[in-house]
Amino acid sequence: MQKKITRGIVLGVVVVLIISILGFFIGTHNKGVRYEETISENLANINKEKTRKYSVFTNMVDAIQSYNKYEGETLTKIIEARSNGDIEVGEKLLSVLVEQYPELKSNENYKTYLTEISVTENRIANYIEAYNKDLKDYNAWSRSFFVQLIYQKQSFLTI
């Protein structure tokens, strides 16, 4: 009877030990996967914002060129009408222009798009900061002794 109890205790300890070791391996692997997913997500966010920055910049250039062209053409028409002595045509052009664009200022477009680019740059900086922090944590974790025995780490570059 004493042997059965001892065997049961030993068997229980072995089972608990096996479950603990298995849990450690699974937990270590899962933590590595979570780190990798977080880092990959941060990198995707950086790339998304860089794409947005390019898009905003391209839109800014297109809009400003169109607006500047329109302003230039309108100004040319007004100057031609004035120099020809046709003040009424010039006044009509100017009236239509003021009605459609009460604040005809190209610099407002510049300001708007520069603000957008600045916001995007700040987002990129924040994502890079998060990426580098998570990468630092991942690298520290992955260099620990037991993790090196268990987990094959993925390489990421610091930005």
Image (spheres, rainbow, N blue to C red):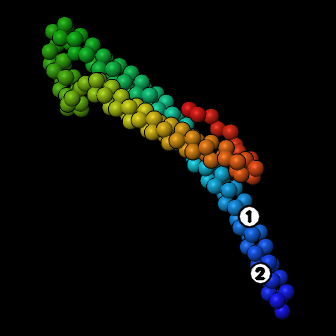
User: In the picture, which quadrant includes the N terminus?
Assistant: bottom right
Q: Which residue is drawn at 61% across and 43% down?
A: 140
The foreground one among 117 and 69 is 117
For disc 2, the neighbor class at 10 Å (few under 14, some 14 to 19, many from 20) is few
For disc 1, the neighbor class at 10 Å (few under 14, some 14 to 19, many from 20) is few
Picture coordinates of residue 62 (x, y %)? 42, 26
The foreground one among 159 and 152 is 152
User: Which is in the foreground here, disc 1 or disc 2?
Assistant: 2
Picture coordinates of residue 131 (x, y %)? 54, 41
- Judge from the rendering whether residue 99 lies leftward or rightward of residue 148; answer left or right: left
Residue 49 seen in this snapshot: no
Q: Which residue is drawn at 80% across and 83% down?
A: 6
Picture coordinates of residue 26 (x, y %)? 71, 61
Secondary element at tag 2: helix
Residue 91: quadrant of the picture: top left
Q: Residue at x 17, y 26 (%)?
A: 95
Check the image and name the residue furthest to the top: 83
Residue indicated by mark 2: 9
The foreground one among 131 and 88 is 131
- Judge from the rendering whether residue 58 lies leftward or rightward of residue 75; answer left or right: right
Residue indicated by mark 1: 21
Secondary element at tag 1: helix
Q: Measure the alpha-carbon separation of dots 1 and 2.
A: 18 Å
The residue under label 1 is which amino acid type?
Answer: Ile
